[in-house]
Image (cartoon, coloured by chain):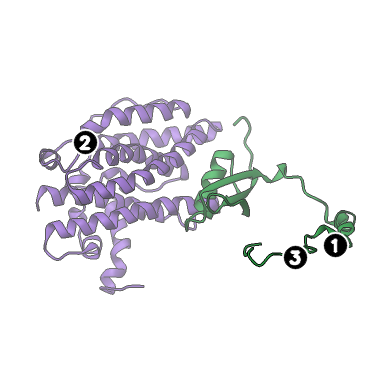
Amino acid sequence: MTPQVHYVLRLADTNLVLAQRLGEWVGHAPALEEDLGLANVALDLLGQARLLLAHAGRLEGEGRGEDELAYLREESEYFNLTLVEQPNGHFGDTVMRQFLFDAWQSGLYEALSRSQDATLAAIAAKGLKEAAYHLRYSGGWLVRLGDGTPESHARVERSLRELWPFTNELFDDDETDRAVVAAGIGVLPSALLPAWDVRVDETLARATLVRPAPVKFAWFGKQGRHSEHLGYLLAEMQSLHRAHPGAAW
Amino acid sequence: MSEAQKDWPLYEIFIRAKSGLDHKHVGSLHATDARMALEHARDLYTRRQEGVSIWAVRSTDIVASDPSESDAFFEPARDKVYRHPTFYDIPDEVKTL
């Protein structure tokens, strides 16, 4: 697998897995309005994931389309960030995971819209507007919960503490990253950190939350080594296609 | 937010379909605050590109006429046909009136 295919799959898988997680809220959100709000974010991410998967399939040139890539790869062949496969938990957990992610993806798409890979640049430019809205949505909720009641504050404070260790991976550079940066295609993860810090610190302050201390621990989802949760998610997501190959609406 | 409120207040939502048209009432929704009302309205009522502008108004801020007073309010206009501009001959050249 070339670094470019690997890189595009990382972006695609990260979106696909998070879309699947958010989809789990449908029918279960605290209010009907939030049901639709979360589903909207999920659909935006899924739309981007489909474009990215199709692009990865074309780059790979082995005849795999978006469905083969989404439904017929094993856990170790998925390269999503470990943060997005974490379970939804309560609504505050989901909001926190989403906020940490949106703050990252906004910066990523901004930089990626200048990629030498014209398809990737176009997907990023489209996604940038969607990511800006997602950040507004998750950031708004984070401030409401953090600066809300003592109960909601305590809950999202715990969410922050639990999800914080997974943010290291967002800014971790490896060989694939360096190769696509050298080719003018990709963005160096560590270069996204300063802008992310600004976004996160500003919203955490408004949410009266304290940024946790840095953690050394790192995850390796983007290299295909996942937490215990991804396998279950994929089993559910892929079961229909595996039972009825090629099933369509 | 100083005190917790169990039920989210109701907002009435008005959407402008495109520039130049009026905002039209499309429905209502629940939200904890004005910002969330706009976001929910965006997610609920503009999913299929229905609008370019959203107004959200707290339902409790709307002053409404009382149905039991509708006779007093609306009956007196019934016999005043001269208020309708139907006594003009419209020139053939005017198509859009």
Front of the two marks 1 and 2: 1
Q: Amino acid at mark 1?
A: Val
**Vertical position of residue A168 compared to residue B49: above or below:** above
Q: Residue at x 20, y 60 (%)?
A: A73
Does the rendering let one see residue A79?
A: no
> Which residue matches tag 3?
B89
Q: Chain of mark 1?
A: B
The foreground one among A193 and B25 is: B25
Instruction: Give coordinates of residue A145: x percent, y percent.
Output: 50, 36
> Which residue matches tag 2?
A189
Give the letter of the purple chain.
Answer: A
CB-based contact (under 8 Å), mark 3 and mark 1: no
Quarter of the image where the N terminus of chain B is located: top right
Q: Residue at x 44, y 54 (%)?
A: A39
Quarter of the image where the C terminus of chain B is located: bottom right
Q: Colour of chain B?
A: green
> Which residue matches tag 1?
B81
Q: Chain of mark 2?
A: A
Instruction: Give coordinates of residue A68: x percent, y percent.
Output: 21, 65
Dot 1, crowdedness within 10 Å: few (<14), some or many (≥20)? Answer: few
**First of labels 3, 1 by sequence position:** 1
Q: Amino acid at mark 2?
A: Pro
